[in-house]
Amino acid sequence: MIQRIQSVWFLLAALFGFLVTQVPLFVVKLTNNIERRILATESLLLFSVAVGLACLAAACVFLYKNRSLQFRLAVIGVVVSIALIALEVWQTGNYRTQYANSLVNSSYYWGGLLPVAMAICFILGARGVYKDQKLIRSQDRLR
């Protein structure tokens, strides 16, 4: 299970998914020198998609016997993580409009990059599963 490289990628994706809920995604500096950090827990939709995606990645680790299902779930994970990136951008846009009258500066924090890292880990995990499927098919042909 863990000896396969895609299991490591799926574990990293799960770790990044749970980490998204704990670190700031966006920082807003207001006119009175107040710095407000925006977390994923402030939006129920963002929080639930991040946790669901992390659970999907953790489930992919234990589906090593069913490679076709593992591959399909990895592709779904890529699509949902791209949707999570779009949702995060939309949510930060809402915060920018909410604080528009007192906004001095706003920027993404390093937690905002975690959904991108999740997408990359899902892509690399799917690539590893695909290589395993290809290897099994080639060995079946040799028998």
Image: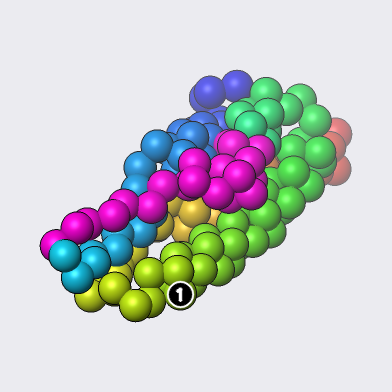
> Residue at 38% across / 52% down in the picture?
38
Determine whether 2 is above or below 78 in the image.
Answer: above
Q: Does the magenta stretch include residue 18?
A: no
> Residue at 71% across / 53% down in the picture?
75
User: Does residue 29 appear anywhere in the picture?
Assistant: yes
Q: How would you classify the magenta stretch by its main secondary structure?
A: helix
- What colour scheme does the image use? rainbow
Q: How many dots with numbers?
A: 1
Please name the amino acid that badge 1 sits on. Answer: Thr
Determine whether 127 is above or below 141 in the image.
Answer: below
* Relative horizontal placement of residue 67, taking residue 121 as reference (left or right): right
Quarter location, residue 133: top right
Give residue 85's position: percent from left, percent from top: 54, 62
Determine whether 86 is above or below 57 in the image.
Answer: below
Quarter location, residue 48: top right
Q: How crowded is the residue under tag 1: few (<14 C-alpha within 10 Å), some, or many (20+)?
A: few
Q: Give the residue at the far left of this rendering.
A: 33
Q: Give the range drawn in magenta.
A: 33-54
Disc 1: which residue: 97
- The N terminus: image quadrant: top right
